[in-house]
Image (cartoon, rainbow, N blue to C red):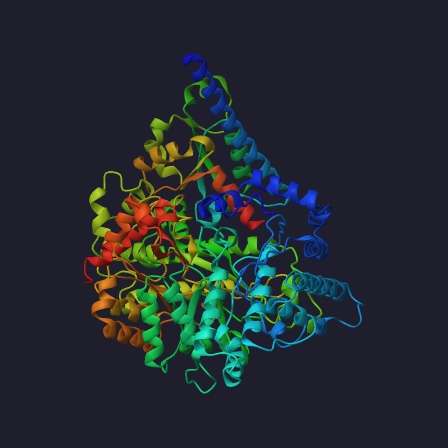
Amino acid sequence: MNEVFDEKKLTNAKLFEMKHDQDVFVLVDKRCEDKCPGFIDARNRGDFETQFALFTELCHITIDNASFVYFFDFDFRFLTGINNITPAYDIILRQGLSDLIYEKEDTVFKKRYNVTIRSIMALAERIAKEAEHTEKGTFFQKMVSEPAASFREAVQRILFVNQLIWQTGSGLVGLGRLDRLLDDYYREDIRAGRLDRQGAKDLLKEAILILHRHVWYKSGTLLGDIGQAITVGGSGYDGQYESNDLTEMILEIVGECSITDPKIILRVNTHIPGKILEKAVSCMATGVGSPLLANDDVIIPTLMDFGISKEDAYDYCTSACWETLIGGKSSSMNNQASVSFVKAFNSMLAEELIYNLKSFEDVKRRFFFHIKNEVDWALANLRKQKYRRNTVYSVFLHNCRERKKDIVDGGAAYHNIGITTVGLANAVNSLLNIKSLVFEEHKYSMADVKLICLMDYQEKEEAVDQLKNRRQRYGVDEPEVIDLVNEILRYVTEVTKNFRTDIGGRVKFGVSSPNYIRLAPNEKATFDGRRRGEPMAVHISDNYARGYTQLLNFGAALDYGDNRFNGNVIDLMVNPSFIENHNEKFIQLLETGIKIGIFELQTNVVKSETLIDAKAHPEKHWGLIVRVWGFSALYVELPESYQDLLIERARQNERWAV
Amino acid sequence: MEDYKSEYEKEHTLRLRNSKIIDCMARWISLKQNNINVMDFFLERNCRRIAIYGASRLGRLAYDEIISSSQLEPVCFFDQNAEKINRYMDFKASVYDPSQYMDHVKEFDAVLVTPIFFFDRIEAELLRKKPEIPIISFETIIFYGEQKA
């Protein structure tokens, strides 16, 4: 079974490479056809339910000595394209599968829905039979008709749904607010004396380690880009901070296990208890890149302004990296297109008649015109996108059953769409440099700017350093800079606000993007010292900052209103010795950030020396974890361009940090 | 062997060049069938007087397209074979050698480059002479049209 992808014989990197190899697809599909005639045919017809029924009937079930059942059969390759969302795990916790079946099958959706439920029940029964006379077997037997009755059983059900969604081709499957989902079961087991804290922690740790397996299979664009976000903590309706024993437990586990994924999103607000932040910083200090802090005080009001109900806004989690999402109720895919401000800036330089750019206002006006072009292009592509059904997702997402609609037809409560933007810092810095150097100091003409950028600083080498570290730049807490950034962000809202998808979804966007390296090679130089092909700036960051406070002030001053909430992460490079020697100061810094209104924050706790040595001697640093965009990965498994960027950013940070 | 290799490389380059032109033409036809005028690209950028770089088939078709727009004016051609063209062909507009670019640069607002395969080289050459003037690849305006489609 699963011979092509033999995890015992091949490395994650090799398996990940094979996963994207067309020849391997052919081989896997051929094996599938031999094992399960009709599966590929059903896939070609877009008949998800037949594929799924065949899978549940014929897949290979793997049951090992672990406390939980969780397996994949790699011979069955589903294609759906629905990614980045978090199922409603509570659906399977509070009832048995049979309770979900429609009595009357009078619509196509109901028929498809019932076929899918029956297939899931058939698989649960097969697993129960395979694991007969064990507790695991009992869990699967009960799953058909009863709600979950214990902490372990609840965890098993969550794992089962998670496994089904990954298996059926959907990626970046979030885990939602796990501390809240499991709290009742945990407390009931503790009260009844069936479990103690350590026992629960051991079970949860095992589940998290199980989710961490199959890294190659679950990874998206890069090895490690898995998106199993666990959201913990958060505000209650009264504004107070709500957490429980499991919140702390999850923070402890991820820190102790030193794993790249699952990752934690810690919801924070001004009332967060010091001990939770201390635990968060301890976890960050291990270098795992978790948790990412998401500030409820900013995010919740923004979500409500956008039209999300109060109940749902208070229950938000994130999908994949940092994009806010109403877990279990939203089919909003949050990373469907990327708009490059660098491309807009370069198009302006290349395509405009320089004589028409007589003032900074002219430059800005034409830059906005090119932003609009970029946005229009991204939206036009979104309009054309169609997704293949994954009815398993429709089963495990609220509202689809009530509305009798698949998620691809708008069954979920929210079905907006998210785009990311990249290169804002480069574009803003270029504009600021044009303003001061061209129109105020008259050191360059616009023709010089164009020549420098399009000719990649040829014969103008000295300009690179001059332009890189100007006093006024993105990340600096100065009104002129902040006003310019906010003006650009509000303009993007202006050109996206009337867009609607086929099913009525709106567009949201944010300033964090995974594409700062992927989109860079084709982009010409910018007037901020960035050469052709060099990576664009990472999220909300400033390589030349002289302290964290200024960057936090800057991040807090940006306007995240309207539809601008699709991920806005301050990305800090932190020297491990800084946290070690100034732990309290670092916690205070985070508290201040939350208070002044940052949106999100993530850290990379690592020093350049370690990264350089790891690049030269990967065998010595196999377990070194770094935060990449919104995920963590093993440093030695990253492409060289990502390794180099991290080294450069760590070096810049160490110039001032101690 | 070396000759063979060089011949092969030449032919390979020629094939690539032709396939790029064919692709561009096909995309242009498709846009025309959808009534999309790619030359609006220039109007949106306030460039009305257009010079065309390359007087081959694609360049001449571009000339016809520009002249059909009442708001645009095709000013002249630049072509490395200007002398031959002027000697043997009855052409619709003046054809200049690229070395004469600076003599005429005040007459146009933008240059449309039709030898798309060599765009980077041509762009660099013309930008060095006069960076103020936009140098636009024919592919860029096709892409613009596709955005509008």
Instruction: In the rendered view, tell whether residue A17 sits above or below residue A174.
Output: above
Q: Nearer the viewer, residue A81 or B142?
A: A81
Q: Which residue does the image show at 34% across and 59% down from the upper left?
A: A361
- Please give left or right for residue A458 compared with residue A420 in the image: left
Residue A22 place in picture, x, y as percent: 56, 40
Camera sees residue A234: no
Of all residues shown, which one is farthest toward the front? A133
Number of numbered labels in the structure image: 0
Q: Nearer the viewer, residue A496 or A155?
A: A155
- Please give left or right for residue A60 compared with residue A444 in the image: right
Residue A656 place in picture, x, y as percent: 19, 61
Q: Nearer the viewer, residue A205 or A173?
A: A205
Of all residues shown, which one is farthest toward the bottom? A238
Residue A301 place in picture, x, y as percent: 46, 78
Q: Quadrant of residue A550?
A: bottom left
Instruction: In the rendered view, tell whether residue A39 sits above or below residue A402.
Output: above
Q: Which residue does the image show at 49% across and 17% down from the upper left?
A: B88
Q: Nearer the viewer, residue A532 or A52?
A: A52
Residue A638 place in picture, x, y as percent: 38, 48
- Please give left or right for residue A426 compared with residue A90 in the image: left
Camera sees residue B9: yes
Instruction: In the rendered view, tell whether residue B71 sits above or below residue A71.
Output: above
In the rendered image, which quarter contains the C terminus of chain A? bottom left
